[in-house]
Image: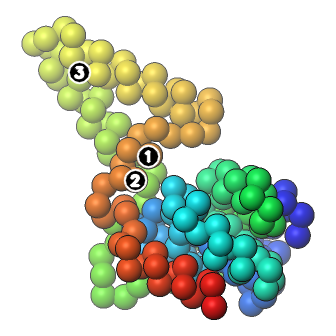
Amino acid sequence: MAPSTALTADQASVRLHELTVIDVRTPGEYASGHLPGARNIPLDHLDAALPALKTAAARGGLLIVCASGARSATACRHLADHGITAATLTGGTTAWTQLGHAIDRPTGTRAPWAMDRQVRLAAGALVLTGLIAGQRWNAARWLSASVAGGLVLSARTNTCAMAKVLGKLPYNRPTATDLDATLAALAD
């Protein structure tokens, strides 16, 4: 695969048995449902995984997955900068599930909310807080304005600073043992 390869959900489904699938979402998002056989390496841990990913890519195709395809495209560019060829899943897990492809979910555990849902809750709560507090202290309205500005910037740049902040919360972080186990399995 060339560094800029993108696979549709249907193309990936046919080749899933020959691909090493890396999900770059947060552990909470990953736990909410992921492609069968996918391993979780959050985007901000990609540098630590480079040696294992290089080994995995040498064995066969590497497919990088996220919710929409934006983070996986970023990951593919980063991997290409380090000489690792990978493909991204066009439309991410959203497209995958919309087309009726199976996803795996851990049993017996309650998965944290998906990151987009966490962002909507945080943004809505901050805007509401700014508006309510603004009834008493005019300066509090700047909280609502700053969140609104951040959402506009997020849409324009297809990035999300709030998601990066929320991604640092404990339930959105991989445990060291989970990440170590993933890296060890990829290196074998």
Circle 2 crowding by C-alpha within 10 Å: few under 14, some 14–19, many from 20? many
Q: Nearer the viewer, mark 3 or mark 1?
A: 1
Residue carrying label 1: 163
Which numbered circle lies on residue 167?
2
In this rendering, does residue 115 appear at all? yes
Hey, which residue is sitting farthest top in the picture? 138
Alpha carbons under labels 2 and 3: distance apart: 26 Å
Q: What's the amino acid at mark 3?
A: Leu
Give the quadrant of the N terminus: bottom right
Q: Secondary structure at mark 1?
A: helix
The chosen color scheme is rainbow
Which residue is pictured at 61% across the width and 39% down the height? 158
Q: Do the numbered discs 2 and 1 sit on residues whose CB atoms are within 8 Å?
A: yes
Q: Is residue 154 above or below residue 1?
A: above
Alpha carbons under labels 2 and 1: distance apart: 6 Å
In this rendering, does residue 102 appear at all? no
Q: Secondary structure at mark 3?
A: helix
Which residue is pictured at 59% across the width and 80% down the height? 38
Task: Out of 145 and 84, give the one closest to the viewer.
Answer: 84
Residue 79 in which image quadrant: bottom right
Residue carrying label 3: 131
Whichever of callouts 2 and 3 sits on the residue coming sooner in the sequence is 3
Which residue is pictured at 57% across the width and 40% down the height? 159
Q: Secondary structure at mark 2?
A: loop
What percent of the width, then of the height, locates residue 91? 69, 59
Q: Is 127 displayed left or right of 88 in the figure?
A: left
Residue 135 in which image quadrant: top left
Hey, which residue is sitting farthest right in the picture? 2
Circle 3 crowding by C-alpha within 10 Å: few under 14, some 14–19, many from 20? some
What percent of the width, then of the height, locates residue 144? 32, 22
